[in-house]
Amino acid sequence: QVQLVESGGGLVQPGGSLRLSCAASGFILSPYSMAWYRQAPGKEREFVATIDPTGRRTNYADSVKGRFKISRDNAKNSVYLQMNSLEPEDTAVYSCRIPLRDYWGQGTQVTVSS
């Protein structure tokens, strides 16, 4: 059974940082590009970042470029999202995805508030 489990969300003040993790079980991530998405209350789910299988190529939504960094550790079968300079507009449920297989995790809540 394929499982993607996100962790690392929480409540943080504006300007703060969080590091999200996405750990896979029942599936080997290394051959696949991975992505992070987010969904804010009352809004459509939106793309945040993607990383290729080698970890050398990444792409970001304009809204997070320069503040977020996606990375992966294929030995740990995991993907990460380092989020810096967080803003209230970043508040959302963040989910990881294997785009080619359309597998999704259950998501982790990130709340940016003073």
Image (spheres, grey):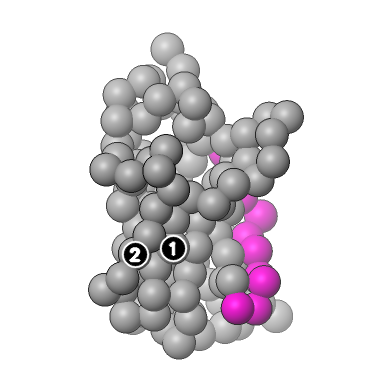
Give x and y (percent) for residue 7. 49, 51
Pointer 1 local density, CA inside 10 Å: few below 14, some 14–19, many at least 20 = many
In this view, the residue farthest toward the top is 114
**CB under 8 Å between discs 1 and 2:** yes
Mostly what secondary structure, the magenta segment?
loop
- Give the amino acid type for the residue marked by disc 2 in the picture: Thr
- Give the amino acid type for the residue marked by disc 1 in the picture: Thr
Q: Residue 83 colored magenta? A: no
43 or 12: nearer the viewer: 43
Q: What element carries label 2?
A: strand
46 sits left or right of 33 in the view: right
Name the residue tied to disc 1. Answer: 50
75 or 90: nearer the viewer: 90
| Disc ID at residue 107 | none
Q: Can residue 33 be seen in this view?
A: yes
Q: Is residue 21 visible?
A: no
Name the residue tied to disc 2. Answer: 58
